[in-house]
């Protein structure tokens, strides 16, 4: 689970969809709730949680700085967060997705193309379970 400050950095990385240096993260976050001096701590924490990765190096003035990119998509992070909040089946210990998934599908305005895509994903998952 990410802190609100970490989530702000991740939102920026997801939105920009490119690797950013520490300075770029600070400059592209004018409404940040964290102080620029804490960026080092935030980035180290995100690296430790394996949600970002060092993507390379970029020249910033006379020096080179590491660039950081998201190591997980926004959708994958959201799925992880949701699965941590789902109730677990008392017998199997597995997450019970059915009730929440059914409610999401029933309440959302979903077109036929989206339903077909969801069906393909479910069909693929069934095939991998049989293997």
Image (cartoon, helix red, strand yellow):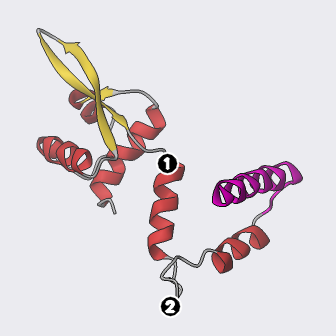
Task: Pinpoint residue 105: horizontal percent, then vertical percent.
Answer: 75, 68
Number of the label disc, if any, that sits on residue 11? none
Residue 19 belongs to magenta span: no
Is residue 74 in view from this perspective? yes
Q: Main secondary structure of the magenta part?
A: helix
- Taking the view exactly as shown, the residue that stands out farthest to the right is 112
Circle 2 residue: 90
Nearer-the-camera pick, 80 or 12: 80
Is residue 58 positioned above or below 116 on the image?
above
- Which tag is nearer the camera, tag 2 or tag 1? 2
Mark 1 secondary-structure assignment: helix
Q: Which x, y percent locates residue 31?
A: 32, 45
What residue is drawn where x is 67% and y is 56%?
125
Which residue appears farthest toward the bottom when viewing the image?
A: 90
Look at 29% across and 52% down and name the residue there.
Answer: 6
What span is colored magenta in the figure?
109-131
**123 displayed left or right of 48:** right
* First-in-chain label (2 vs 1): 1
Question: Residue, x 41% and y 45% (percent of image)?
Answer: 11
Which image quarter: residue 59? top left
Q: Residue at x 46, y 54 (%)?
A: 77
Asked if one can make out residue 36 in the rendered structure from this viewpoint, the answer is: no
Label 2 crowd bin: few (<14), some (14–19), many (20+), radius 10 Å: few
Residue under pointer 1:
74
Crowding near the residue tagged with mark 1, few <14, some 14–19, many ≥20 C-alpha atoms within 10 Å: some
């Amino acid at each position: 689970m990410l802190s609100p400050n970490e989530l702000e950095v991740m939102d920026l990385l997801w939105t920009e969809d490119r690797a950013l240096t520490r300075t770029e993260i600070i400059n592209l976050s004018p409404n940040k709730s964290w102080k620029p001096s804490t960026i080092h701590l935030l980035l180290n924490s995100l690296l430790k949680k394996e949600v970002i990765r060092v993507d390379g190096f970029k020249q910033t003035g006379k020096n080179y700085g590491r660039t950081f990119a998201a190591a997980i998509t926004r959708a994958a992070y959201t799925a992880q967060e949701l699965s941590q909040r789902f109730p677990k089946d008392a017998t199997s210990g597995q997450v019970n997705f059915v009730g929440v998934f059914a409610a999401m599908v029933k309440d959302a305005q979903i077109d036929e193309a989206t339903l077909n895509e969801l069906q393909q994903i479910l069909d693929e998952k069934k095939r991998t379970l049989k293997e």
